[in-house]
Amino acid sequence: MSYPFKISSEEDYRKAWNKSVKDPEGFWDGVASSFLWRKKWDSVLEWNFKDPDVKWFSGGKLNITENCLDRHLGLLGNQPALIWEPNDPEGHHRVLTYRDLYNKVIQFANVLKNNGVEKGDRVCIYMGMVPELAIAVLACARIGAVHSVIFGGFSAQSIADRLQDAQAKYIITCDGASRGAKEIPLKNVIDDALVQCRFVERVIVLTHTHTPVSMIKGRDVWWEDEIKKVETMGNPDCPAEEMDAEDPLFILYTSGSTGKPKGVVHTCGGYMVYTTYSFVNVFQYEPGDIHFCTADIGWITGHSYILYGPLGAGATTMMFEGIPTWPDAGRFWDIVDKYKVNILYTAPTAIRSLMGYGLGPIHGHKLDSLKVLGSVGEPINEEAWQWMHDNIGKGKCPIVDTWWQTETGGIMISNMAGITPAKPTYATLPLPGIQPVLVDEEGNEIEGNDVSGNLCIKHPWPSIIRTTYGDHERCRQTYFSTYKDMYFTGDGCYRDAEGNYRITGRVDDVLNVSGHRIGTAEVENAINMHAGVIESAIVGYPHDVKGQGIYAYVIYDHPHSGDENLTRQDITQTVTRIIGPIAKPDKIQFVSGLPKTRSGKIMRRILRKVAEGETENLGDTSTLLDPAVVEEIKKGRI
Ligand code: PRX
């Protein structure tokens, strides 16, 4: 397969970027033309950021699965589309060719139809990293149902919140998921969630771990039984539903600075174009390359760079069920050698955790198939960058540091492997089509180089968030109202003398823990649910492996009369129950009060400094209601 939009030199990059700024519509018209459309668009772009109202390829008709599957059958039908490596290194791996994947998607799309799923219905997918997860996602897209994948680490309560928000009547899950030595009873978690969600009509359950489950009559069905029914119908075809470019493709929930996660909505046409375009260019994908993105499909990285981007490009994509440190810290390197992986796209937190095991687990591995390494999810520190460069890439693989977000749908700022220069800890330059700007607190654009500011994007790109599900005003407020006529990312950023961008971290109350976005308000709400807790405040602090750790200051009812550690465990358990294990505080400090201004606002700046270990220069504390509380907090630091 050829990619007419592929950039192949630095000069090409400059030219493409300049064209994309001078004539964005002409630029994207060109890129989109190499995809398969049932009907061409009437207009490339209609937009305003005030409402916001952004429409790409308006009037265009397509189905993303025809681009990811059907159109490859002729040339690539027998090529591997998806390679699956199980959690258990002794287990059977699976290779699905484009033809296999197509057949399985068609079959499961018919299962969905038989179970009453229609175009526009929301389908929640809560599965482990098994090939059927990819099949379920694509089957939804095939029939125009809107998928909403929920990461396997979220609790029953989080699932219930999301199901209610999306009003999802259909669920696809597994009996259980395997993650390292652990087994997660997914169906049980779903059952707990459904106590609150009576509107759910059907739960389709895949057998995977053989974890015992309770199947509710009339509501729950086995995946395998439903497949058999389609087989007895003679495996009929399932023509792709014709979708408008702006019809929703999926909802993915993500945390913000308020308590409730928001459902980021992406649409069919623009998302399809941007994910494949960015995949090919950033990783410089060449036909035949094996691409291994280690993310979970429960996050946007898995959506865009395990599934849609690579499949749109006719690539071979890998899916790994396990974790990098089980049964030992050589697991990634075993996989790279076993499948001759060419592109490895992972997260700084994984690298940092593997660095902790030293070079031993790398020894005995060739790693000579690797051509490109990638990093995503959080700023990569220089040490991790260098370690990856020297020990994994053996000094010869470019590392792409890709900055983007759930809301952006695809990679926005990144070097292009071997084409534009890398600079450790810098995401470097925007992709053609992306216009980043730095602004000051008042929203004035900060021009020139060697400057810092809040990162915004000036002009729409095809995979920009369209709305937050069920609450468009929230989308406007969060992303488009802080600065006029710009999309606000929530990140702080530095632009160096050469114009390279370096992301410095969130400027809002959002933490980034092991590359996962966690809203402080969400965690505080969960802690406050615990009996005995009067109030709490969460801040991030630097953590060697996770990037940021969660530090909780908690005012507790009967001050530590009992066992403090037991209380800590109870609070942690409450957070696990309300949100999930990913939001567990790393440190809990009991305090008698929180530093508040006279208007009652918590001064997080002070809490952050204490958590970071800075107890001297806490800045101006004169506006505090009770400055004495700061002394106590400093003394009690953990
Ligand atoms: O703060 C930035 C950080 O992750 C945030 C987006 O999180 P999420 O929507 O969960 O998506 C993660 C995967 C795309 C951003 O606002 N972030 C992501 N990539 C980078 C990064 N920070 C620095 N460098 C990156 N390469």
Image (cartoon, rainbow, N blue to C red):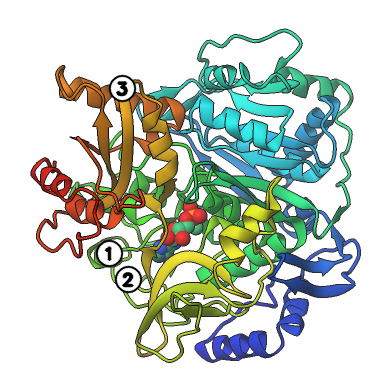
Closer to viewer: mark 2 or mark 3: 3
The three-letter amino acid code for the residue at tag 1 is: Asn
Q: Quadrant of the C terminus?
A: top left
- Look at the numbered discs 1 and 3 and tell me whether their residues touch, using CB distance below 8 Å: no
Give the alpha-carbon distance from disc 2 to disc 3, as whole Å: 43 Å
The three-letter amino acid code for the residue at tag 3 is: Gly
Label drawn at residue 381 = 1
Q: Where residue 278 sits in the image (x, y, percent)?
A: 59, 68
Q: Where residue 471 sits in the image (x, y, percent)?
A: 68, 48
Label drawn at residue 532 = 3
Q: Is residue 374 visible?
A: no
Residue under label 2: 425
Q: Where residue 369 sits in the image (x, y, percent)?
A: 41, 61
Q: Residue at x 31, y 27 (%)?
A: 533
Check the image and report above or below for 263 versus 159.
Answer: below
Q: Is residue 86 visible?
A: yes
Quadrant position of residue 55: bottom right
Q: Residue at x 32, y 44 (%)?
A: 538
Nearest the viewer among 12 and 551 is: 551
**Upstream in sequence: badge 1 or badge 2:** 1
- Look at the numbered discs 1 and 2 and tell me whether their residues touch, using CB distance below 8 Å: yes
Give the alpha-carbon distance from disc 1 to disc 2, as whole Å: 6 Å
Q: Where residue 70 sits in the image (x, y, percent)?
A: 79, 52
| Disc 3, SS | loop
Check the image and report above or below for 334 versus 199.
Answer: below
The three-letter amino acid code for the residue at tag 2 is: Thr
Question: Is the residue marked by circle 2 packed among few (<14), some (14-19), or many (20+) residues within 10 Å?
Answer: some
**Upstream in sequence: badge 2 or badge 3:** 2
- Look at the numbered discs 2 and 3 and tell me whether their residues touch, using CB distance below 8 Å: no
Q: Residue at x 31, y 56 (%)?
A: 366
| Disc 1, SS | loop
